[in-house]
Image: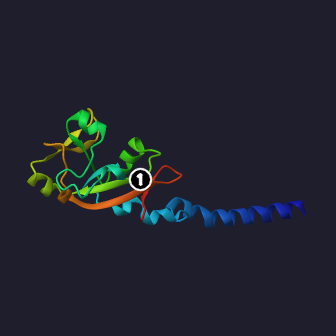
Amino acid sequence: MEICSFKMCAFILAGLLILILPACWTGQGDKSHKNSLSTKLKQDALYKIVPAQNYTPETQDDCIKLMPLDIESGFIHVSFGNQAEKILQKFFKNSKDIILLELDPQILSQHGLEVRKEQNKPGGDFFPHIYGVQKIPAKAILSVIKVAENAYGSWAEIN
């Protein structure tokens, strides 16, 4: 009798694992994948990540209050779409009200700004940096994406 019960329990458990594990591997168990950054962002587009209060679109010539790192570095730090989540995890962990501003490189260029891909350290990744006046014109903003960190430390678009 005990062997039969054990076999039955093992059979039921195996069946449940077959149903549940694929959802965990593909992200189907977490509904936030619909809004994940990897599906929303253009991989080669430029994004400036800032707290929402740092963006004032009504200020036409200088719509973004830059981060201290931008001011100290002498250039504006931005990322490509495929780098944005890594940047969010490293520099914005546990932050609230964060937005990604998609930037138009042509508009930036028309305002005397130059985008350069530069390596962050020998052997490191290449990131886009904006040189020139430390101002981003409102016309250069193509889209504004509000994001939030979930309980697992990844980021997704919110409405």
Residue identified by numbered label 1 = 97
Q: Position of residue 118 (x, y in %)?
A: 20, 40
Q: Residue at x 35, y 51 (%)?
A: 53
Residue 74 can be seen, yes or no = yes
Report which quarter residue 148 is drawn in: bottom left
Q: Quadrant of residue 21?
A: bottom right
Q: Position of residue 81 (x, y in %)?
A: 30, 54
Q: Name the image quarter holding the C terminus.
A: bottom left
In terms of depth relative to the viewer, which is nearer, 19 or 118? 118
Say which residue appears at 43% left-offset and 58% top-offset: 156
* Image quadrant assignment for residue 110: bottom left
Q: Residue furthest right?
A: 1
Instruction: Reply above or below: 44 against 77.
Output: below
Residue shown at the point (69%, 63%) measured from the top left: 14
Where's residue 133, x and y in %? 14, 43
Foreground of the two, 151 or 39: 151
* SS at badge 1: loop
Q: Is residue 71 above or below residue 16?
A: above
Q: Amino acid at mark 1?
A: Asp
Visible residue check, residue 45? no
Tell me which colouring the rendered structure shows: rainbow
